[in-house]
Amino acid sequence: MTTALQRFNQYNPLAGAWFFVVAVLILLPALIFNSFMPDWAPLAALLGLLVIFLLRVLATGQLIGHTPADGPLLLLVLSLPLGLWASSDATVSLARVYALVAGLAFFWAVAAQRDASWLRWSGWALLMAGLILGCVFLLGTRFSPDKLPFINRDIYTALPGGLHPFWNPEGFNANLSGGVLALFWAPALVLAWRGDSWQQRDVAKLVLVTLTALLLLTQSRGALLGCLAALMLISVLQDRRWLPFWLIVLLATAVLAYHIGPTLFFETILGESDVFGASSLQGRQELWGRAAALIRDYPLTGVGLGMVEPAIKSHYPTVLIGPDSNFKHAHNLYLQAGAEMGLPGLMAHLGLYGVLAYLLVRRALDQGAGYYQVLALGLLGTLLVFLTHGLFEAITYATRAAIVVWGLFGLMVAVSTSTPSQNEDD
């Protein structure tokens, strides 16, 4: 039996990581853009993924354990049928299940590249991806010029705009654009400082300045706070002498918040919102309370993917948020996961974030990891940006943006579990 399996794997292309990721990428569009496809297309893609993963299991000889995050991710997969069963509109939830499965497949495909030779060049890939997405969002974002008072509104009249993708003809939400671009800000910061070559450091500086300018244009307060948190963590991990400085900054901020009152302080930071109007904090607090009620009432199954807004409007009507408001999600990553997928889904998400944080911190502190230590430090900043921004938004609710997040999660695992060559320079 073992000899037959070995002979089979000699001809099994999925034994190679490159073919694995290419095969997955071919099938992803049918799942991500399932609403634009005939009904059979996402089902066929789902079946194709199942075949690919079964062949991958035969090639590796193990069913689970391909990544350290397999435990929480399998719990996430197992919670999907329960969410479909609980959903009041299975059609809406099924479309989001397809997209989530696409994200999970992309995660495993990228994570499988941990020993691929190209991983050494993933820093360049992060810089180019940030720059390309920056151009796309500059052309296609519906900017909100009224959030940050120090930015001149006349700037927005000079922006090119005009990009209307077929899946989102109204353009991208500014908070979504800011949240996605911020994911590439921390790697650009670290590579501008500790890049592999002077060419990479110079390009990273250009990308860093570009992303910073675009983040300010989006006026996404959550994204900017996430970048600030990443800056604090990265600087302290690299040089402990930064710790007293940041402690003084945090203490001064806490004193200021106490002096003017916590509510007024956070209201000033959050300011206006397209969804919540002039009182973004109060609107979010009301929505967070409704999402918490959903978790309390549907602890095992949640209400199903994509069903938080309909469930709140039909069973937990809001007062501050008007009935015509399209808030779409809970505007909090953690409450959104719990409300959609119940406590098992929330535990799966938190478990994934915990595993990623552990892997990245361990690699970022590993002096023998060479360039992978630099990449891990930048990606640790990415994770912190995502989790901080997630206190105010849930960018993974947007299925096309979610595939970017899942790809970055896979890269975090690949970088953190790769085996640096013995002759790699630190």
Image: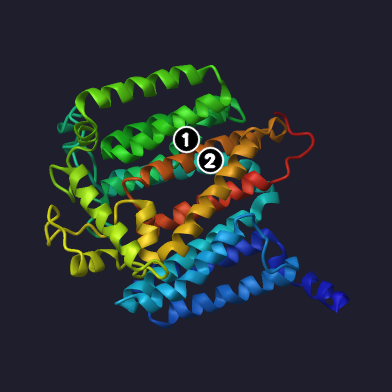
Q: Could you give the CA–CA distance between mark 1 and mark 2, rounded to whole angstroms?
A: 7 Å
Q: Position of residue 69 (x, y in %)?
A: 60, 56
Lateral position of residue 25 relative to residue 332, left or right: right
Question: Depth check: 12 or 306 in front?
Answer: 306
Residue at image coords 35%, 52%: 394
Circles 1 and 2: CB distance less than 8 Å? yes
Mark 1 nearby-residue class (10 Å; few <14, some 14–19, many ≥20) = many
Question: Depth check: 425 or 94 in front?
Answer: 94
Quadrant hosting residue 111: bottom right
Q: Position of residue 380 (x, y in %)?
A: 53, 39
Q: Which mark is residue 207?
A: none
Lateral position of residue 332 relative to residue 386, left or right: left
Residue at image coords 19%, 49%: 283
Question: Depth check: 7 or 50 in front?
Answer: 50
Mark 2 nearby-residue class (10 Å; few <14, some 14–19, many ≥20) = many
Question: Depth check: 391 or 420 in front?
Answer: 391
Amino acid beneath label 2:
Leu
Residue bearing the label numbered 1: 186
Q: Position of residue 298 (x, y in %)?
A: 35, 68
- For label 2, the SS is helix
Residue bearing the label numbered 2: 379
